[in-house]
Amino acid sequence: MEVIPAIDLLDGKCVRLYQGDYAKSQVFDDNPVAVARQWEQQGATRLHLVDLDGAKSGKTTNLAAIEAIVKVLTIPVQVGGGLRDRASVSRLLDLGVQRAILGTVAVEQPELITQWCAEFPQQIVVGIDARNGKVATRGWLETSEVLAPDLANRMAKQGAAAIIYTDIHRDGTMSGPNMSALRELATAIDIPVIASGGVSSLTDLLSLLALEPLGVTGAIVGRAIYTGDINLKEAIQAVGNPRLQDIPPDGFSTFA
């Protein structure tokens, strides 16, 4: 399973929110580029970036920070937050971002997902952020009547490369992932599901690993790696896949 560190950008700083509440943000570092390099050095195979300002405003806001991060890393980067038109998606992909994560537009203009998946194959990921099973939009400030499994099914049929599922009530709370919702989602679709929200310990990651045969191929970790509750390098060694460059020439990995 891929263990994916997250960087949430707010006013150009690396922060974490509590249950998606912008009023409950905690700044962990004012240099997101340095943080990104740190996670790569600890063995991350992918970085998850969220433009929180963009998610609220509907426009990519932290473009300078995103570009700076992409330039210094050798691992792929996926970005979400405020991507609601083709120009915004194309701009990020042109910068070298590997995958664009779409949320609000998947609910409000689902036909665009079909178009963009065809134009940017395997580069469009849909983020499904659920509050009591219903999909939230516009930076989690609004809640639709769309059910998470229904949206996941539709997006899989329209060509999404993967689904990132976040339980908002667990995000930033260190209370563990919503295992039953993830199991239901992964069973219902045939594209990869990435778990997000609440991952607080190596035990949580090991629990998620049990869902890997169902299609839960990755886990995004946020607050826990900033507080030290999860050591990213150790977590990758325990449940993740080491980067190819980390495997010695004799073919035997030093990872557990």
Image: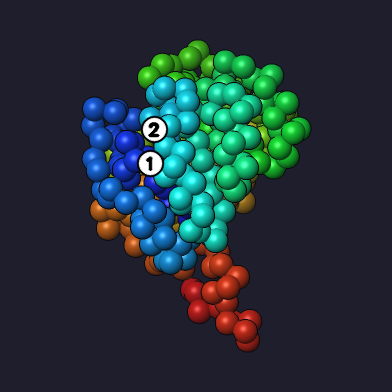
Of 69 and 180, the residue lying toward us: 69
Residue under the point 50% across and 36% down: 80
Q: What residue did someone put label 2 on?
A: 52
Q: What residue did someone put label 1 on?
A: 8
> Which residue extends farthest right?
118
Say whether residue 230 is left or right of residue 48: left
Residue 153 quadrant: top right
Q: Counting other residues with Cα less than 10 Å from the Cα at mark 2, is it few (<14), some (14-19), or many (20 or more)?
A: many
Say whether residue 134 is left or right of residue 126: left
> Which residue extends farthest top?
145
Contact flag, marks 2 and 1 (Cβ < 8 Å): yes
* Amino acid tagged 1: Asp
Q: Counting other residues with Cα less than 10 Å from the Cα at mark 1, is it few (<14), some (14-19), or many (20 or more)?
A: many
Question: SS of the residue at dot 1?
Answer: strand
Of 186 and 94, the residue lying toward us: 94
Say whether residue 112 is left or right of residue 101: right
User: Which color scheme does this rendered protein use?
Assistant: rainbow
Q: Is residue 199 visible?
A: no
